[in-house]
Image: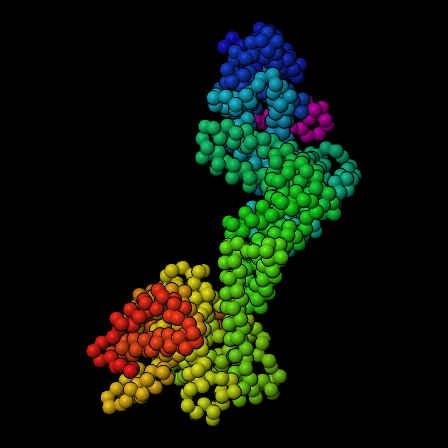
Amino acid sequence: AAALRVSQSIVDGTSRFVPDRLDIGALLRERLRHAHSVMQVLADNGLSAKLTLSARTRLSANAEKLAAVTALWELQNAAWARTGAALQLLSNLAAAFVEGAGQQSRDPLRLFFRNHTSAIGDLLALMHRRLPALTRALAVSASGIHDSNLVSYEASRIAIALLQPAFAYRFQHAHLYACSDGAASSDALPERWTENPMITDLLIDRLGAAYSLCRDLSGRHCAPIYERICATALPGDDSPEGAGSTLAIFDDAVSASRARPAPESEDDDQLQRLDSDDPYASPRALLRESIDQVGPLANLCFRVFVDRIARLDTSNPSSAQVLSQRYDAVRTRHLLCLVPLGRAPAAFRLAEEYRDLASLVTLVFVADSASAASHLRHYVERFGKEFADTLLAFYERRSAWASLLYTQDEFFDSWLKEYIDCRIADDPHGPLSQVGWIHDVKMADFGAAAAKLTRAGCDAEEVNQARTMLSLSKLAFVAVEAQESVLDDTMTEAYSRLEDALELCEVQAHFLHYYSALLRHHSATTAASASAGQTWRRRDDANDRKAAYDAAVLTTTPELRHSCPAQYIVYSELVRRLWNGRSLSVEDLLDALTFPDSLYPVELVNESERDEPDEQSNAVVRERFSLAVDVLCRASFSLPELTREAALRTIWRRVFLSDDWPAIRRRATGNVPDSVLRAELAATNLYHVLRSCWTMRELAHPDWYLLPSDVSVSADIEYLVSTRLMPQFGQTDPSNDASSSSSASASQWKPLTATTAQALTQDYIAEDKRLQVAIDSGLDEFYAEILRTVIDQATTSASISGHSDDMLPSSSASEVDSAASSGESDEQMDTD
């Protein structure tokens, strides 16, 4: 307590150990020497450890304030010694402070330095409050703008002159006061006088004002600097009109090299050729001084932020987090603003000191792109993996995949692999999943490469791209087999899924081949193509869309288009996407397979030939249904349960609806022999699909053989319309169609409106009604009879081939037989 009283009396000018003097500079220096001696004597006598952390911080603060006002007084004296104008802002602030304290003096400035040294933080807060009104009042005339610039310059000069010496004293004598030891103890860090939020806000405002002053002055007096400032969009800048000519250096490292400043010496040479070094007399001198202020102001601002955050981390973590976010934004912006001012070396030093690795990476490319490689190697050696991760994130944001994947050191190879794997784990479908496999190949980790390639192939937007990625994945599996004689279960399952994904690509490629051949054989399309020399492979234009819609018309009957108009719109869009080589989701692919009802072999598409019996068309339709079941089996592992169940019901419902059950009932009942019944049922699409599923395609689960009563769409309408189809095909803004069609690309064009969404619901309801008509016509009994016939035929075929019934999946056979038996009724006809 005694030491604190002595130190405080020295600062206030009431100590008997420091006699008063007229020479303010000598008086302040003597006070600083005595204030420092208080702590030095305690330390020399081994008493400093007995002081609390709060007491040591207060002793340090008193000495820091004396160091600050001593430097500020020397600045004021230097200004008075020069001819011409001098600092006026400080005198005005001192007068306002003294008057606010209720004191009167003919020399308020000296009174302040003599008696109010401890209130130097309050003086800075007063300056921060008064500056906005003062600059606005000055900037009302041409001469006022000049005066406003000088006031802004003086304010920054005062802040630097006060805070720089204070921090210099604090760091120089940190070992003496040991104020940072509280971070390792239970004591909370006390608030330092420089952590006043008003001082933080003052420094942020000074930084912005100094940069604005540099921009305004360079616009009239130094074109090279002004051009670089105008060509640079800093983080946080509002996008002005015509921002297309503005360069965002934080977003594009490659282009940012255009905004690279001239060497610092060139700017200095331009600004050194002055008639006067007095910033009050020469605008170019004022520009030079203002540029020199930005670096020190940034350093002081960052230091105040760091100290406040360190203290709040222990006392108020939530406030510390908010302040950290603000600090990150301020630091990034004002580090990068040094680049167009020609102070890139200062930006590098500050980024290194405050460990802003993201800004440091950007500065490497922005400030000196020619030496980027050597700088990067230096920083990787200095900061290690943390800098490497920041650099890789920088490349990823800019999609600079070649730079990201190019490595020369083994330790960096391991860091890159870890980074890629972590990013893919966070975002399995992100861009890194498309290129990360390249590094796995370099590392000879072919199993990981195969997995990434499979995922990339499944995520590809185009069929050809998917095919390529999946084929590369297959090659990677071959390499794994070469390394390991036997694949483990995980790799075997992954290879099986790869084969399934490749098969889905082949199905879509088959679609494209079929539609292309269909249009070539269609007389009108063939004539049009021949006359125009078109190949119908121009993507997303009007002709291309017309060709796809022609294919949709050729594969559906007028009855289907009339009864299900909204579903037909969806089908037409799916055909268009297939026509353009786009990959379809499993559900979309199943819709494209099961919706059309007029699928002829290509050679029978002419109208004269389509008058023949429908057996050829039925064969293609049946194959499509069987293929849909196969597709769902292959993709079932990747589908959510709701999606899988809805898709399975859709397939079987459309299989049931593909046959005319009322007509079959009329022909197969009554006074007809069993042979007619068997022939009628064997001619149905249902019979051929069930036979295909049972004998050639083993379904994933026995319960996938659904009964007609289990495939109603009522439970799926909400999901099908609102969740699946409308988000994909519905227009978000159907108004102004003409303008939207001209401005938006055709790939973004969506055919469904709110009205057609309601029609889509009605189409599904109509499917249910047709299904009920089929059930009322005896579909349940026919289904059970057909299924039993298929099972009997399969069993007989297996016996003839010398195989026992055990070769059939017993669980599947028993459950299907149970399902068939449950559908039997008294009216069921015996096939024997």
Name the residue furthest bottom. Answer: 608
- In terms of depth relative to the viewer, which is nearer, 696 or 100? 696
The image shows residue 671, relative to residue 279, as above or below, that is: below
The image shows residue 51, relative to residue 294, as above or below, that is: above
Q: Is residue 718 left or right of residue 4?
A: left
Image coordinates for residue 534, horizontal then vertical, percent: 60, 81
Residue 746 showing in the rendered view: no
Q: Is residue 83 magenta?
A: yes
- In terms of depth relative to the viewer, which is nearer, 86 or 619? 619
Residue 580 showing in the rendered view: yes
Q: Residue at x 43, y 71 (%)?
A: 697
Q: Is residue 468 magenta?
A: no
Image coordinates for residue 28, horizontal then vertical, percent: 63, 15
- In terms of depth relative to the viewer, which is nearer, 548 or 810? 810
Q: Quadrant of residue 337?
A: top right
Image coordinates for residue 65, horizontal then vertical, percent: 58, 20
Q: Residue at x 42, y 83 (%)?
A: 618
The image shows residue 184, relative to residue 220, as above or below, that is: above
Color encoding of the figure: rainbow
Magenta-drawn segment: 76-93
Q: Residue at x 38, y 77 (%)?
A: 796
Image quadrant holding the C terminus, namely: bottom left
